[in-house]
């Protein structure tokens, strides 16, 4: 292979499964198969519920869990990640279904998959580390609220009202229930949710979600509860792959929803993989491979009628806790769900919708980590503001706007905090006075020289404060700016420094600068900040040298007497007339 094709192929090859992945799958197959079976039991009601909640039906959720779960496990960047339909994705899909129908969801998922593959090839996975924790906690809280509100019609046993705003639809469902109450559906939903929440506290390893759904289905069948609407018939197996849903004329209008789906898939998948890393020792996911695997999964799932998928934090956590060691566990989970699709579709079709609503209500409650939210809210006022803003925006608008708003506000607050760390302090020059001085000369130097030390960043958010403070300097002949503690300088900071120097010069005050770092000199020179300090030898390496230059300037100006035979360093700087 020549050099050019090798350079093109190398980034792709790094995203493909390696031999080490296959060898890891053979290390502990029994533990992985058991973990996969356990995760499948937990994932079955969730896949059904999220499929129904998305608007495409229970079969779409199962197809996603099987197809996307297998491909993401094989090609993803985490050995322990479990992927499938999630509540967060459902929040994004409901408005797409309302605006474009089921075919719009499938098309948006396919486009999102292509975008994720492009992000992986562009090595964009590393940017996940820059998402602040309050933003993650805020949208998790907001998603939990949205999921709970989405289940209100199913839990109350009323038809889902029209509209894509969960607050509105939940309110309309509550009014419909008040007019025509369905106590059977409400009892089933609350019973399933209570069994899951209480059972998880009592015996965390027992899959109470499946047991509660089985009990609710049996009760509805044995007691003949006519108000317990079942989820409906499921096809016996996965449909043949097809692109029949693709409408090329609708692509322009689906680009924005596809971006939202891709952004959420990337964010939630990488977050879930990070959680898996934190629960284990020695496991580290590859974020770019994870994006690549999720991209392939979302390209394939719509071909089989599935909804977009992401890494699922709850299922991944179950996978880790039950002892999974490799990708074999996630592949086994997909295989078990495939067996359910092919062998038990008639039984699954009898599950009441209210029971699935109860499963998702309990899932929403368990998504909220009260202790984590309390700690985040108490950390700083800025963290509390970002968390609350992200959660409210998720509930009122949508997740993408929420993340954008959270990142924007978090960035602005972080800039303000950094800007407040920057200080301009007047410092005593006496300890740095070189040579021997009489009391009279020392007094004259202290009277005519003032030194300021700049600590922290000299950038756009803090620079103008320096301008105001330095512009108020009066009754001195020389200002020394000590910049050895400046951490960074941008163009705005350099421009402000140039303006300060020019204003002081017009008032007859000489400016000397010391301690400029090599990396910051370029920013100062690019805007002419150092050119405003004539001559150029007024930029000194350290404070003692700067004070020596200030003394030479004062002697040249006649403020200090120049002794006979003074060395060059004690004379006035070149190009500066005596005053």
Image (cartoon, rainbow, N blue to C red):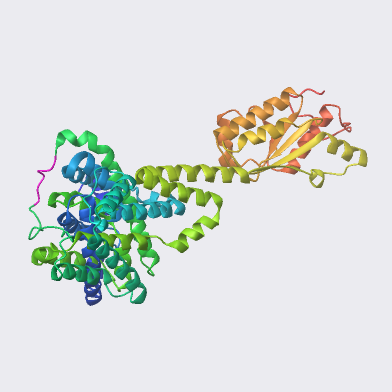
Asked which quadrant contains residue 443, the reply is: top right
Q: Residue furthest front?
A: 179
* Residue 142 in the image, given as x and y percentages of width and height: 38, 51
Asked which quadrant contains residue 429, the reply is: top right
Task: State whether residue 268 appears in this view.
Answer: yes
Asked which quadrant contains residue 20, the reply is: bottom left
Task: State whether residue 13 appears in this view.
Answer: no
* Residue 143 in the image, given as x and y percentages of width and height: 35, 53
Q: Is residue 487 above or below residue 34?
A: above
Q: For the point 59% across and 28% down, which residue is it? A: 528
Q: Is residue 92 above or below residue 316?
A: above
Q: Is residue 503 or residue 535 the one in the foreground?
A: 503
* Residue 74 in the image, given as x and y percentages of width and height: 22, 60
Indicate left or right for 36 with 498 as reference.
left
> Mostly what secondary structure, the magenta segment?
loop
Q: Is residue 579 or residue 227 the one in the foreground?
A: 227
Q: Which residues, given as a range, are shown in magenta?
A: 241-246
Indicate left or right for 458 with 444 as reference.
left
Q: Considering the image in quadrants, where does the C terminus appear?
A: top right
* Residue 400 in the image, given as x and y percentages of width and height: 35, 44
């Amino acid at each position: 292979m020549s050099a050019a094709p090798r350079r093109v192929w190398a980034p792709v090859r790094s995203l493909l499964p390696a031999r080490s992945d296959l060898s890891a799958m053979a290390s502990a197959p029994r533990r992985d198969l058991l973990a996969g079976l356990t995760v499948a039991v937990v994932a079955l009601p969730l896949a059904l519920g999220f499929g129904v909640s998305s608007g495409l039906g229970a079969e779409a959720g199962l197809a996603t869990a099987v197809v996307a779960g297998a491909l993401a496990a094989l090609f993803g960047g985490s050995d322990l990640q479990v992927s499938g339909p999630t509540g967060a994705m459902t929040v994004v899909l409901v408005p797409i279904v309302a605006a474009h129908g089921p075919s719009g969801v499938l098309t948006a998922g396919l486009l999102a998959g292509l975008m994720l593959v492009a992000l992986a090839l562009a090595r964009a996975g590393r940017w996940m580390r820059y998402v602040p924790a309050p933003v993650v906690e805020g949208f998790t809280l907001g998603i939990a609220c949205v999921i709970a509100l989405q289940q209100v019609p199913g839990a109350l046993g009323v038809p889902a009202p029209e509209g894509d705003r969960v607050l509105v639809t939940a309110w309309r469902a509550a009014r419909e229930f008040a007019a025509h109450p369905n106590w059977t559906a409400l009892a089933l939903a609350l019973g399933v949710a209570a069994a899951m929440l209480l059972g998880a506290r009592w015996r965390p390893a027992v899959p109470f979600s499946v047991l509660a759904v089985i009990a609710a289905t049996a009760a509805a069948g044995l007691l003949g509860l006519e108000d317990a609407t079942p989820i409906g018939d499921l096809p016996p197996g996965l449909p043949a792959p097809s692109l029949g849903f693709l409408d090329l004329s609708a692509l322009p209008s689906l680009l924005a929803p596809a971006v939202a789906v891709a952004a959420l898939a990337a964010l939630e998948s990488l977050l879930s993989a990070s959680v898996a890393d934190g629960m284990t020792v020695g496991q580290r996911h590859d974020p770019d491979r994870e994006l690549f695997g999720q991209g392939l999964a979302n390209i394939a799932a719509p071909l089989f009628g599935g909804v977009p998928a992401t890494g699922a934090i709850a299922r991944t956590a179950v996978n880790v806790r039950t002892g999974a060691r490799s990708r074999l566990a996630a592949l086994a989970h997909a295989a078990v769900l495939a067996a359910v699709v092919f062998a038990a579709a008639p039984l699954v079709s009898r599950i009441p919708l209210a029971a699935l609503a109860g499963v998702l209500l309990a899932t929403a409650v368990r998504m909220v980590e009260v202790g984590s939210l309390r700690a985040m809210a108490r950390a700083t006022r800025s963290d509390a503001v970002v968390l609350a803003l992200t959660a409210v925006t998720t509930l009122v608008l949508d997740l993408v706007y929420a993340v954008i708003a959270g990142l924007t506000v978090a960035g602005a607050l972080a800039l303000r905090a950094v800007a407040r760390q920057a200080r301009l302090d007047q410092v005593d020059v006496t300890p740095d006075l070189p040579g021997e001085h009489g009391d009279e000369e020392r007094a004259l130097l202290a009277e005519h020289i003032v030194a300021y030390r700049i600590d922290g960043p000299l950038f756009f958010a803090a620079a103008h404060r320096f301008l105001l403070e330095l512009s108020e300097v009066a009754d001195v002949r020389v200002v020394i700016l000590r910049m050895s503690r400046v951490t960074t300088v941008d163009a705005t900071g350099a421009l402000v420094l140039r303006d300060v120097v020019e204003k002081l010069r017009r008032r007859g005050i000489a400016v000397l600068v010391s301690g400029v770092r090599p990396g910051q000199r370029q920013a100062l020179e690019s805007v002419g900040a150092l050119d405003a300090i004539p001559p150029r030898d007024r930029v000194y390496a350290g404070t003692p040298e700067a004070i020596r230059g200030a003394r030479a300037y004062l002697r040249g100006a006649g403020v200090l007497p120049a002794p006979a035979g003074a060395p060059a360093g004690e004379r006035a700087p070149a190009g500066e007339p005596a005053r």
